């Protein structure tokens, strides 16, 4: 089998045109808005989960930070749904693309930093130079703190990309090993198949956890700057 290991991470095309925009828009269909007086069970569960998550995540924020509630809830729903849909066979996961994750992380990080410089200018500048720093260390610490600040969105994007990509590669490798062992050693193939099932269950948990971690870190950056 000469299948490319990274073929599933290539951007899908239809008639020579990339359809990644349609794939990104697809998760919005999973969260319909109801105009009924009494919602069905599915929408009620979705609303309860959103309210529970928003209450837990936004409890530390002041009034300025709570204006980001809708954006952060939309972010966690989008990342979580795309991660879960990417676990379906013959599907594409947009969050395995570093460019897309950077496209989400950089504007959100920049928005929190700009809010910090606008509303808490002195506190934002004070992060670059901790109190009590010796004079001869001031230039070095300013450079280090500046680099650490600009590394935050890169760390956000790389963390999400690496975790989702690693899980997909493991599933691909173990699935291929299971198929190869079916004719050689059925008992070994059964063991690897059980491992594949357990890994798939773990990946469902990782898909939700990574969505929560990404949104939580953005929320913490917002809290530090409001």
Image (tube, rainbow, N blue to C red):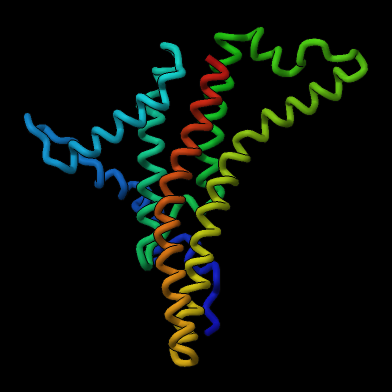
Left-right relation of 150 to 119? right
Look at the picture and state if 189 lies above or below 129: below
Please identify the residue farthest to the bottom as the structure is shown: 184
Residue 65 seen: yes
Say which residue appears at 53% left-offset and 57% top-offset: 165
Residue 17 seen: no
Left-right relation of 52 to 57? left
Please identify the residue farthest to the right as the structure is shown: 136
- Residue 135, given in percent of the width and then of the height, sits at 90, 13
Say which residue appears at 45% left-offset and 52% top-offset: 94
Comparing 132 with 186, the one in front is 186
- Residue 87, given in percent of the width and then of the height, sits at 39, 60
- Residue 68, given in percent of the width and then of the height, sits at 41, 22
Say which residue appears at 46% left-offset and 50% top-offset: 206
Q: How many marks?
A: 0
**Residue 16 appears in which quarter of the rendering?**
bottom left
Say which residue appears at 44% left-offset and 88% top-offset: 186
Comparing 23 with 203, the one in front is 203
Left-right relation of 146 to 121? right
């Amino acid at each position: 089998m000469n299948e490319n290991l990274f073929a599933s991470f290539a951007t899908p095309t239809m008639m020579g045109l990339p359809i990644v925009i349609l794939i990104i828009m697809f998760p919005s269909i999973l969260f319909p808005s109801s105009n009924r007086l009494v919602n069905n069970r599915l929408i009620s569960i979705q609303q309860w989960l959103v309210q529970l998550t928003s209450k837990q995540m936004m409890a530390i924020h002041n009034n300025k930070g709570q204006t980001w509630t809708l954006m952060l809830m939309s972010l966690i729903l989008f990342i979580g749904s795309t991660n879960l849909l990417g676990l379906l066979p013959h599907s594409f996961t947009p969050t395995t693309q570093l460019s897309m994750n950077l496209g989400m992380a950089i504007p959100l990080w920049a928005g929190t930093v700009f809010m910090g410089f606008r509303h808490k200018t002195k506190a934002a500048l004070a992060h670059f130079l901790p109190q009590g720093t010796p004079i001869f260390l001031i230039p070095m610490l300013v450079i280090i703190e500046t680099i650490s600040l600009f590394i935050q969105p890169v760390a956000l994007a790389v963390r999400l990309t690496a975790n989702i990509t690693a899980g997909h590669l493991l599933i691909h490798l173990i699935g291929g090993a299971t198929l190869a062992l079916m004719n050689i050693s059925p008992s070994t193939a059964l063991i690897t198949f059980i491992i594949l099932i357990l890994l798939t269950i773990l990946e469902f948990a990782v898909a939700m956890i990574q969505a929560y971690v990404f949104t939580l870190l953005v929320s913490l950056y917002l809290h530090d700057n409001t």
